[in-house]
Image (cartoon, grey):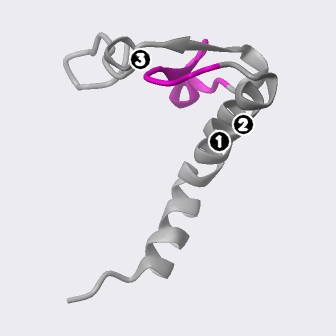
């Protein structure tokens, strides 16, 4: 069975994932425009997007190991 990418995109927009992806892209492009070398690093939001953060809250460069792992609650949500 083939994937329905159009439907996946619609579902992503309904969940609010699209807006978060756009925020991440804007943050990366802003650093690229400033001439920051981000090779091997992640652009991390000071306040996580899943917690209501945005680019206005600030971004920083972090190692992928630090940016992609967070302390979790027993239900798996971020602390």
User: Residue sitting at 75 percent across and 23 percent down?
Assistant: 35
Question: Quick one: 6 or 66, which is closer to the camera?
Answer: 66
Q: Which mark is residue 25?
A: 1
Question: Quick one: 30 or 22, which is closer to the camera?
Answer: 30
Q: Residues within 10 Å of mark 3 (few under 14, many from 20)?
A: some
Mark found first going from the N terminus, 1 or 3: 1
Q: Which mark is residue 67?
A: 3
Read off the magenta span.
37-53
Magenta-colored stretch includes residue 41: yes
Q: Quadrant of the N terminus?
A: bottom left
Q: Quadrant of residue 29?
A: top right
User: Residue sitting at 33 percent across and 24 percent down?
Assistant: 77
Q: Are marks 2 and 1 in contact (CB under 8 Å)?
A: yes
Question: Quick one: 25 or 57, which is closer to the camera?
Answer: 25
Mark found first going from the N terminus, 2 or 3: 2
The Cα–Cα distance between marks 2 and 1, rounded to whole angstroms, is 6 Å
Disc 1, SS: helix
Magenta-colored stretch includes residue 23: no
Q: Residues within 10 Å of mark 1 (few under 14, many from 20)?
A: few
Q: For this view, does 12 lie left or right of residue 29?
A: left
* Residue holding disc 2: 29
Q: Nearer the viewer, mark 2 or mark 1?
A: 2
Disc 3, SS: helix
Residue 37, how many percent across, how many down?
61, 20
Q: Are marks 2 and 3 in contact (CB under 8 Å)?
A: no
Residue 13, how many percent across, how many down?
58, 61
């Amino acid at each position: 069975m083939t994937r329905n990418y159009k439907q996946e995109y619609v579902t992503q927009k309904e969940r609010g994932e699209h807006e978060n992806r756009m925020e991440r892209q804007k943050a990366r492009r802003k650093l690229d425009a400033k001439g920051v070398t981000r090779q091997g690093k992640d652009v991390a939001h000071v306040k996580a997007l899943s917690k209501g953060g945005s680019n206005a809250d600030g971004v920083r460069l972090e190692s992928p190991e630090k940016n992609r792992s967070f302390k979790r609650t027993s239900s798996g949500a971020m602390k």
